[in-house]
Amino acid sequence: MNVKRKSMLITLILLAVGGVRAMAQDVQAAMKALDAERLAAARTMFTQLAASGSAENQFYLGYYYLRASTLDSSKREEWIGTAQAAFDKGVAADPKNVLNLVGQGGVLLAKGDLVGGKAKINQALEQTKSRDENAIWRSAEMYTLFEKGGKTDPAEAIRLIDLIGTLKRKTDRADYQIVKGDAYLIRNDGGPAVTAYEEALRLNTDNSNVAKIQTRIGRVFKRGKNYVETQKGFNNAILADSNFAPVYREYGELWLMAGSYARAAQNYKKYLEKGEGTPEDRLRYAKFAFLSRDYQSAVDQLDQVKDKLKDNDIQRMYGYSYVELNKPDLGVENLQQLLQALPDEKELPTDYGYLGRALVLTEGDSLTKIRNDSLGYFYLMKAAPLDTSNNFISYVADEKFKNKDYVGAAEAFRQSIIWKDAKFDEKPSPTDYLRLGQGYYFAYATTPKEQRDSTLLPKADSAFAKLIETAPTYVPGNLWRARTNLYMDPTGEREGASPYYLKYIEVATPDSVKYRKELIEGNKRLAFYAQLKKDNDKASGYFTRVLRLDPTDKDALDFFNPPAPPAPPAKPTTKPGAKPKPGAKPAPKKKPSA
C-alpha cells in the first residue's frame, strides 16, 4: 500500500470514529434531556438522530416515545404507537440490530402483554446468545419502565443485570446499577435498591448521572418514611444539577406529605419551569396551588389543560377555586355540571360542601337568596358527616350567625362541637364554646321580651362555663358569662354577674388598652352592685378604676360630684282651690298681641 492510499485510509477511519463519537455525544445529550423530563428538547434531538435512517437511531427514537408515554397519559396510546413504528422501521433497516427487537418487546410490555413482551425480548437475546451487554441492559430496563399502566418483571430485570457481570467482556457502568436499583424499588426492597444506587454513584466517574441517582435514593427513603435521608438525597441532586426537573416534583410531593402546601406548590412550580410539564403535571400543580391558597394560579393551570385531559378533577378544581375566589356563580355552574355527570360512587363530600358554600355566597333578590341559602345549608349539612377533613357545619353556623339566625347558628355550633369531639386529632377550641354561647345569648337578647325563650340563657351559661373550664385565662369567657347572668338576674339582687366580672377584670387588666371598653363595663356593673348594698366605699373604688380608663365617664363623674338636686317648684300665692277675698280686684287680663 503506497503512502498516499494509506493516508487516505487513516483519514477515513478517523472520520468514521469522529462520526461515531459525535453521534454518541448527541445520544448522550438527548438522554440527559429525557432524564430531566425536557421532553420537547429530547424529542427534537432524537428525531434529528433518526433522520439518518440507521437502525440504532430508530431504536433511540422509539425508546424516547416509550419513556415519554409513561409521563403523559393523554398521549400514551399515541406515543406507544409511534414507538412501535420506529422499532419496526429499525428492524426493517437492519434485522441484525437486536435493540429494535428489544424495543418491540417493550411496546408489548407497555400494552400490558407480559408474555408477548418476554417472548420478543428473549428472541433478541437468543439472537446475540446473551452476550451483547447493551442488549441485555436495555432488555432489563424494559422490565422496569411500565410500573403504571403496563407490565413489569423486576426479578427478570435483576437477573439480566447480574448476567452482564458473568460476561467475559463487560463494562462496569452506572446505568446497569440504576436499572437494578429501579427493579428493587418496584419490589419495595429499599435496602438493595439503595445499595445498587450507591454502586451506581461509585461507577459514575464523569458525574453525568449524579442528580438522577440521588433523586432515586431520596425516593427510596421517602417510601421508607425516612424523611431526613430523603431530603439529603434530594438536596444532593440539586447540588449536582439544579436544573434536574424531576427532583423538584419529588420534593413537592414530600412537602405535600408533610402538610407544607406552600413549599409543595413552590417546588412543583419549579418542576414545571425546569421541565416541560405534562397536562397531568399541570393538573397536579393546580391542586398544590389550591391547597396553598393560591387559587388564581390553580385556575391558570386548569385553563392550560382543560382541552387536553378528560378528568373530573378539572371541573372539580374549577368549582372549588371559583368559590374561594368569591366567584360563586362560576362555582355553582362547574359543581352542578360535575355532579350531574358523575355516578354516585364518584362523588366526594367536598363536592357538596363547596356547592353549598357557593349557593350561600350567591347574590340575588330576597326570594332567590332565601332559596339559595336553604339549598346551600342542605348541601353543607349533607357533606358534613361524610367529610372528616372539612368542618362544613362550622361554615353553616358562621353564615347563620352573620344572617342573625341565632337559634339556627347555635344549633349548628353545637353540632360542630360534636363533629370535632368525634375526631381523634382535633378537639373543640375555646372559640367554639364562645360562639355556641353567643348564639344562645343573642337568640335571647335580640327577641322581644314577651317572646323570649327562657331556656336559652342556661344553655348560654353552660357553654360559657365549658369555655372557662377549657381555657381559664381566655379573656372573653368570663365577660360573656357575666353578661348572660345579667339577664338571669335582672334586678341584681343576687349579684349573679359579680364573680364573672371580677374574674374578667383580673385576666383583662394586664392588657387594659385592648379591653378598655369591657373593663369599664365590668367596673361600672360592680359599682352598681355595691350601690345596691349602699356600700359607697366599694362603689368608689370601682368608679375610680373607671375614671382611670375614661376620665370623662359621666356615671363615674356623677358619683363623685353628684349634680345639685333640682330646685323645688315655687309656691303659689293662692292656695289651690281658695276663693278670692271679698272686694279683691281681679287681675287685669292681658291684651292679646297683635
Image (cartoon, rainbow, N blue to C red):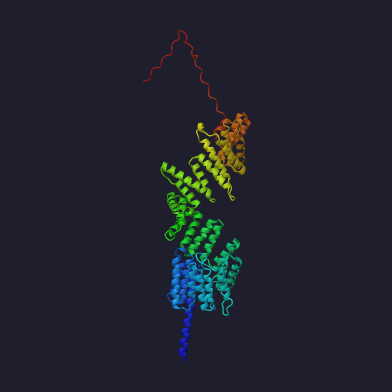
Q: Which residue sits at x=51%, y=39%?
A: 407
How many labels were placed on the picture?
0
In the visual, does 475 lie left or right of 274? right
Is residue 471 visible in the rendered image? The answer is: no
Is residue 6 visible in the rendered image? The answer is: yes
Q: Residue furthest front?
A: 115
Q: Quadrant of residue 585?
A: top left
Residue 537: image location, x then y, percent: 63, 31
Q: Which residue sits at x=45%, y=9%?
A: 584
In the visual, does 86 lie left or right of 154? left
Residue 114: image location, x then y, percent: 51, 69
Q: Nearer the viewer, residue 34 or 87?
A: 87
Q: Residue furthest bottom?
A: 2
Residue 210: image location, x then y, percent: 55, 69
Q: Which residue sits at x=42%, y=41%?
A: 367
Q: Residue furthest top?
A: 582
Residue 369: image location, x then y, percent: 43, 43
Q: Is residue 571 above or below residue 54?
A: above
Q: Is residue 88 above or below residue 548?
A: below
Q: Nearer the viewer, residue 228 or 541?
A: 228
Q: Nearer the viewer, residue 568 or 222?
A: 222
Image quadrant where one finds the C terminus: top left
